[in-house]
Amino acid sequence: MKKTFLVCLLAICMLFTACSGEGSRGNTERKPENTVTVGTNGDVEGGIHEYKITPTGKNIIENGSTDYQILIPADADEYEILAAKELEIFIGEAMGVTLTTVKEAEEGGKYFSLGDTELAKSSEITTTHEKVGYRGFIIETKDENIFIMGAESKGTLYGVYGYLEQELSFDWFYTSVYHIDSADVLPLNNYSAIDVPDIEYRMPGYGYMSLSKDNMNRMRFDDGNDLFIPVNGKQWHNSFEYFPKDKYQAEHPKIYAEDKSQLCYTAHGDADELKWMAKMAAEVIKKRFTEVTDKNLITLSIEDTMTSCTCETCTKEKEKYGSDAAAIVKLLNLVAQNVSEWMAGEGKPYERDYRLLFFAYHQTNAAPIGDDIVLDKHVVPYFAETNGDYTQNFYDKDTANEEVAYNMKKWSEISPELYFWNYDTNFSNYLIPYNSFGAIQDIYKFAFEVETDFIYTQSQYNQENSTTGFGLLKGYLESKLGWNVNVDVDALTDKFFDAMYGDAADTVQQVYEEYRVLAQYQTDKLGYKGSRSIFMNGLQTKFWPRSSLFRWINMLYQALDEIEAIKLSEPAEYQKISKNIENELISFLYLYVEMYENITEVETVDFYKKEFKRIVEKIGLSQYAERNAPLSNIYTSWGIN
């Protein structure tokens, strides 16, 4: 269908909508106010993001040439090699100059020194974990050399991105969508910089990030597969991988809950069985440590249910400490003691500063209260709560998060380390936008204030290539907030739309802002919030006025028209931007067809269905919900297979 016909068709439908009295179908009471600006609770203190940069009057690159090379350690690992490659790629693109990488410095040479090189050592440039943690970095200028160094090689890689950001405004927004300035001169500046992420480890929650090393690295996320040691293939909800029921239930029935849905972490009060549990769990961990020598995180975590053992001993423990987690802490302390004793002796070759994580989740969300509850230094809570409401922040009272925030604070008080599993999507239906936009920053600030060491914001992890409903903006903002919780979210939002949508940025951003106004009204007045809002049925006409959906669809097709001018002159850029615009059509086309098919002209609905399928297949989306929900099911239900 030609675009001109489409515009006419949309105009006719808009007129029909107005004349049909659609506005009176329960929508006349909607009077949302403009509340798009992200609400924050003020900057939080304690972050380290210090850049002291002064000019030297000299240049690194000018007139298309340079005397500088990239220097990496003689025994450089994969991240230091990647850091050199990234610096070479992006400086080459920005300035048209190719830097070479070497492993040995020559006297009188000039270098970007990456990591703990011999030149760094002789120049007395060094850093430590105490100073920059495991992912932070320093940038120093000395003797006309630029030194970029983390205490870990991953920090050195992030330091390269930090340098590129300072000098050439580098920023990575989404797959193949990024910004870097073009320049003729790269000045030699005096650097005295240290930048440490507010939250040490940040794991990506979207499939388009976790399935792409480029996206993960350039957005400064950690790959969970590089951090956690799985047990029988499972990183979490893996307690039955330690104690398979088909293997142990007959001879050790006391180690299972009365309903068999979880372990019994007191072994029904049998001290010998509890000791056996600790020994067997330690054996599993020891075996995994001998098999995987380069990671130090492992979990023994409850199954994904809301149940706990209700035996007499477990019930007494819960009454005494106020939480089902007390029994877990006690058992895991015993497990850690077993593992640590092994590492001090026979397991010395596999010794490491390991962490044994357990879930503070659902029935174990509350922290146990008692003077005798002390966590072994290797035992750490992994805090998660799907009963929360991620349309709201963790500061405000009288929300579903009030108890969640209280519990998280209490865990922080009794544990020197805290891992946090956050949420930001509707897991029942990925195609329905979820209004966590206004809460994201405050949740990250809260996490930082309670000294969270790790954050995983679970999103559409099984959705490949992209996400709709402006989820790409969330992913970008989360990549920034994990590093610095005080970033200017409004400014970053403007940058994102400019980068993603080019000449159509204003129109697409207007759609987003109008959606945000409605979304705030959905949560404040219409009830699209509350406990377990991440599973709420958002497919209700009260949430999505027909006129709004129709308007946003029309505006996004208008946005496609606005980039038509570059279709021939910049075909690659056109393809990228048009794809990004079409990506945001997916949610609105879906919502319209699902709710308003029966009161819309057949030709319009048929067109929307075909467009939905065309765009989904073009972008490569595969799922519409968390649990085995292929998008092909929607095609079938619409009769368009």
Image (cartoon, rainbow, N blue to C red):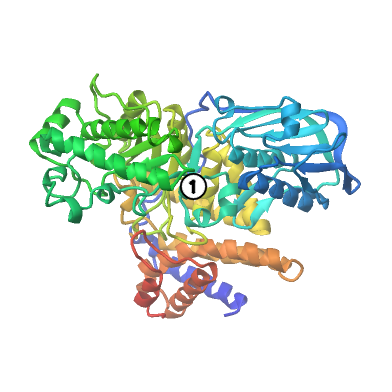
222 displayed left or right of 573: left
Q: Which residue is mark 1?
A: 226
Q: Quadrant of the N terminus?
A: bottom right
Q: Kindly identify the amino acid type of the residue bearing the numbered disc 1.
A: Asp
Which one is nearer the viewer's eye here, 60 or 279?
A: 279
Which one is nearer the viewer's eye here, 82 or 464?
A: 82
- Residue reaching furthest right? 63
Residue 473 visible, this angle: yes
Label 1: how many Cα within 10 Å (few below 14, some 14–19, many 20+) = few
388 displayed left or right of 485: left
Q: Quadrant of the C terminus?
A: bottom left
**Residue at 24 percent of width and 35 percent of height:** 328
On the image, the x and y values in percent for residue 422 come to 40, 42
**The residue tagged with tag 1: helix, strand or loop?**
helix
- Residue reaching furthest top? 371
**Residue at 49 percent of width and 43 percent of height:** 294
Which one is nearer the viewer's eye here, 284 or 442?
A: 284
- Residue reaching furthest front? 346
On the image, the x and y values in percent for residue 316 come to 11, 30
Residue 204 visible, this angle: no
On the image, the x and y values in percent for residue 126 come to 67, 27
Image vertical order of residue 178 relative to residue 348, above or below: below
Image vertical order of residue 546 relative to residue 73, above or below: below
On the image, the x and y values in percent for residue 166 come to 71, 37
**Residue at 20 percent of width and 39 percent of height:** 276
